[in-house]
Amino acid sequence: MNCAMYKEIKFEKAQFRNNGANLPYARVCFIIPSHYFEHKIKDGSAEQRDRAIYTLKITQLIRGQRMALAGLRGLAASGHQEMRREIYDMQNSQTQTELPGKLVRQESGDETGDLDGDNVYNNTGSVYEFYKKIFNRNSLDNHGMPMVSSVHFARDFDNAFWNGRQMVYGDGDDVDFKRHKLAELLDVTGHEMTHGVTNHTSNLDYVGESGGLNESMSDCFGIMISQWVSNQTVDAAHWLIGEGLMTDGKALRSMKDPGTANQYDDQIKNYRDYRPDMDVHTSSGIANYAFYLACKNVGGNSWEKIGKVWYITNTARLRHNSGFQDAGNHTFDVAGSLFGEGSPEQNAIYNAWHDAGIDAEKPDLVANVRPRIIMR
Amino acid sequence: MVTEYNLRISFEQSGGIAGLSKKINLDTSSLPSSEVQQVQSMVDNSNFYELPNNTGQPDPNAADYLKYKITLESEEGRKHTVETTDVTMPAALSHFVGYLRKKIKEQRR
């Protein structure tokens, strides 16, 4: 790749991150004609292909053009085209500086015989497949990044988390959480991996309203993935996050009826009850409820219409400090674009948010949409 | 030779994928002496009193980690609080936190 061009692209990309600031409009000249890259995509090595696709994607962003890659079948998502899973064993250490731990399984490797490791391997694959098939997303960063998971973190650990780079699973202890369930439940994996997707897209701050939205995105996509794998309609689905995880209690959370999943469940389902000091898992009930209501109203499968609106909203509209009103506004607007103003889908979304205490409005796209580089 | 070692420990756990909050208050005078020795060595090995009040800001991209708040108060009134999380915990503190997590569960049984 020509160095001068590469530097120019890097510079533009850095400015692109500056949400909300006035962007300079720059004349960008491309020294290398695009057919050079197309040749590399078709005939180059895997690494050359990756770099060529990546360059064309940035070019497309800079030029504001529709997919420069549209003509190249199967390559619209860039980067390494197959999933790359890596499973590690923390061997009950709680020392987070030791993450990821001991490598026990790589992509296409044999089953290890360790239940948690093999379950996480399979679930991670399902999550990757969902994002690829339904939304044409190639891993968490849409660029084929490896998906790293560690199991057996700490001893009797009732938790799973995303540390910013990888997924981490405890064993459970049969006191609060049943043993092996964190690794077994597909919606837990979907929830954690969606934090990774959110990091690479809206990057919602994990505090306040944006934190509640961040959490809700993980629940919404987690539940969609488990419904997709079981091929359930919105009516057949139970809408419970972490069903069967707790030793006493139905589930961790209910999207259908926030606050009723177990005796400690303090989720809210209406914005009027929101307080800024709430845990992000508490306020996420507002957006969870809106998603559930919209899906039920439209019917069919959650990922087809409402899920698509939610995906576009998280990946192309929301910003790091977006709140519940922004989510209402943008899902309403995206639905208008996709299905038509006044369509049943848009109305379903409007009514759903209304029932959750948010009255959606047309968003201010100049102020809110993440800025694009424009050519003059 | 076991020296007198009376400590009041307050341990709070919050956040996590479940968003649950739990708290326990422990007085070492109510523990068997072998356990008191364990506590003493965990406190010493973690360098507890030298740790900052907050062991660090979590990676802003991290999510669903548990948050912990540990307060130790000795009979003589020496008091120190450390806040930490699954993703920011210093290696030396993990054994003590593991013990405190276990005590919280024992309380609930």
Image (spheres, rainbow, N blue to C red):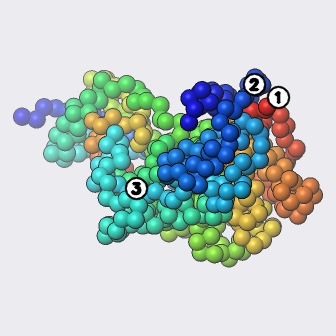
> Which residue is label 2 attached to?
A26
The quadrant the C terminus of chain B occupies is bottom left
Q: CA distance from mark 3 to mark 2?
A: 42 Å
Of helix, strand and loop, which one carries label 2?
loop
Q: Residues within 10 Å of mark 2 (few under 14, many from 20)?
A: few
> Which residue is label 1 attached to?
A376
Disc 3 marks a residue whose amino acid type is Glu
Front residue of A262/A102: it is: A102
Against A37, residue B89 (above or below) is above
Dividing the picture into quadrants, the one containing residue B93 is: top left
Q: Which of pointers 3 and 2 lies earlier in the amino acid sequence? A: 2
Front residue of A297/A124: it is: A124
Q: CA distance from mark 1 to mark 3?
A: 45 Å
Q: Which of pointers 1 and 3 lies earlier in the amino acid sequence? A: 3
Q: Which of pointers 2 and 1 lies earlier in the amino acid sequence? A: 2
- Left or right placement of residue A222 versus residue A326 in this view: left
Query: What residue is rendered at 92% in x and 55% in y?
Result: A341
Disc 1 marks a residue whose amino acid type is Arg
> Which residue is label 3 attached to?
A86
Q: x%, y% of residue B66?
A: 45, 45
Q: Are the residues tagged 2 and 1 within 8 Å (C-beta)? A: yes
Disc 2 marks a residue whose amino acid type is Ala
Q: x%, y% of residue A15?
A: 67, 27
